[in-house]
Amino acid sequence: MFLVRGMRDRVERFSDVGVQLSDIVKVTALSLPVVSVYVVPIAVLLGVVFGVARLSKDTEMVAVRASGISLKQLAWPMLILGALLSVACFGVTEGFAPFAELKAKQLLVMAALRHPAALAKPGQWVEFGGMRMRVGWGDPRSGEMKDVVIVLFEEDKPTIFLNAARGAFEKGTNEIPTLKLLDGEIHEQGRRAVTYFAWTAIPLDFSNRSAFKGFSEKAGGREAHEMHLQQLAQAVSDQSLSEKKRDELRNELGQRCSLPFACFIFVLIGLPLAGRNVRAGRSYGLALAFMTVIVYYVLLLIGQTLVERGLVNPILGNSLANIVFGSTGIMLFAKTQ
């Protein structure tokens, strides 16, 4: 369910210009580590509440308690499993997810370099690296375009605006495609002067052109979700970055340190809630899991909003849901007979 929509969007975007299906499959497969951090905690919660609620419905919990075994004793294997899965999720987000994100971006870049017309969708702004583009009309097969508007932007440098009546993608040297623009003008932010041109060419070299530094393999050119924790910590302390960029990095750092541990938190709160002697069984477990997930992610969004507004520490804000649910779970366990 998490993957289908993203894969559908990629197929719709790239299939009409001949991008290989294998590229789309590879990019989708590389997104699995990121998706797993959201899916595994939900799966753990469903397993706990379905299993324990079913035991309650079948009066198995009554028999277990009559034998002198408490819910607290039954909880240890599940709590240990939840802790191990949390460590595994943390290992995925720290060890494999940044690599997977960077590799997926590189695959998309290579696909775009082979089929650059996929980057131009009539009437829509598309962004890649330090370049934003919109075309009034475009032929995805030939790469020809009309009414082309391009914005070149780079941090701490004036933004450049290009308007051209026509444009086309052509093969340049070293198989690097070139965006050729005809009959246009160039404006630079903060200046009144306008430069007119009969034609100009922009090489779409993502590895060398500074405007496309987001695709660089160096840590300094990576997005926040493509960095490891050590790189995030170093980038946050970099005073040369804008405050907006540093806030983005802090938020990513907070999420990386809190979200993987939702597995343990869901076990901690799911067990005492599902362990009550109820007769609803599966329907109760489904409703309980559904409401728990909704409340958890609402608290997560509230914490992220507080972080974005600079009201709380990034790690504390992103841990708000874990703190509330963890405290509630401990209190419920303490009251469990």
Image (cartoon, helix red, strand yellow):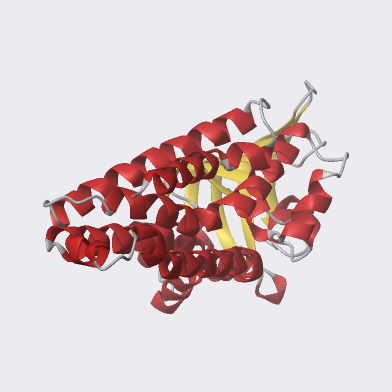
Left or right relative to 211: residue 274: left
- What x and y, as percent, mark residue 117? 49, 59
Q: Position of residue 313 (x, y in %)?
A: 69, 35
* Residue 86 in view, yes or no: yes
Q: Quadrant of residue 209?
A: bottom right
Q: Position of residue 289 (x, y in %)?
A: 29, 50
Whether residue 325 sits left or right of residue 270 in the image: it is right
Q: Residue at x 34, y 51 (%)?
A: 272
Please give left or right for residue 254 compared with residue 263 in the image: right
Residue ID at (46%, 36%): 299
Q: Which of 5/164 is in front?
A: 5
Q: Nearer the viewer, residue 282 or 234?
A: 282
Query: Quadrant of residue 238 in the image?
Result: top right
Viewer-proximal residue among 149 and 39 = 39
> What is the number of callouts on the image?
0
Q: Is residue 17 visible?
A: no
Q: Nearer the viewer, residue 87 or 60?
A: 60
Residue farthest along the right direction in this orientation: 239
Image quarter of residue 319: top right
Please determine whether, in this image, residue 145 is positioned above or below residue 142: above
The quarter of the image holding the N terminus is bottom left
> Vertical placement of 198 versus 191: above or below?
below
Residue 247 shown left or right of residue 70 in the figure: right
At 21% from the left edge and 52% from the top edge, which residue is drawn? 286
Above or below, 245 relative to 257: above
Q: Residue furthest top?
A: 192
Q: Residue lying farthest bottom?
A: 22
